[in-house]
Amino acid sequence: MPEATFRVRWPDGSTDACYSPSLVVHDHLAPGAEYPVADFTARVTAAMAEASERVRARYGMACTSAAATAEGVRSRAAAFPTGGTVRVLSIEPPL
């Protein structure tokens, strides 16, 4: 199953590389796009749930890495209670 890494810049200028066990992240995020923190968090949570279900369908168990990515993004987003935007710097591999 193809996997992806998406790099993001948070409102404070810091960057993170996030793992997705599936290319489904391309259906939820676009390279170069900016999303309000809450919207970004919701998009990543939905993408990781979908990715985990794809892993479950193929291997018979949910993907703990997808759950960890979603939790990491939610935790990081909590540092920005007043909002701001998250910029998607890249998604590798591209479609």
Image: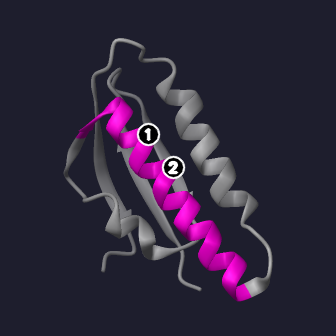
Q: Given contact means CB atoms under 8 Å apart, are the residues at marks 2 and 1 in contact? A: yes
Residue indicated by mark 2? 45
From the viewer's perspective, tell me whether residue 62 is left or right of residue 18.
Answer: right
From the viewer's perspective, tell me whether residue 64 is left or right of residue 21.
Answer: right
Q: Which residues are magenta?
A: 35-58
Q: Give the quarter of the image for residue 87.
A: top left
Q: Give me the residue at 68% from left, 84% from top.
A: 57
Residue 65: mark = none
Residue 56 falls within the magenta-colored stretch? yes
Residue 27 falls within the magenta-colored stretch? no
Q: CA distance from mark 2 to mark 1?
A: 6 Å
Q: Residues within 10 Å of mark 1 (few under 14, many from 20)?
A: many
Considering only vertical position in the picture, is 89 above or below 47?
above
Residue indicated by mark 1? 41
Q: Give the quarter of the image for residue 53.
A: bottom right
Considering only vertical position in the picture, is 81 above or below 76?
above
Residue type at mark 2 is: Thr
Q: At which x and y percent is residue 61?
A: 80, 74
Q: For the residue labelled by badge 1, is the local secondary structure a helix, a strand or a loop? A: helix
Residue type at mark 1 is: Thr
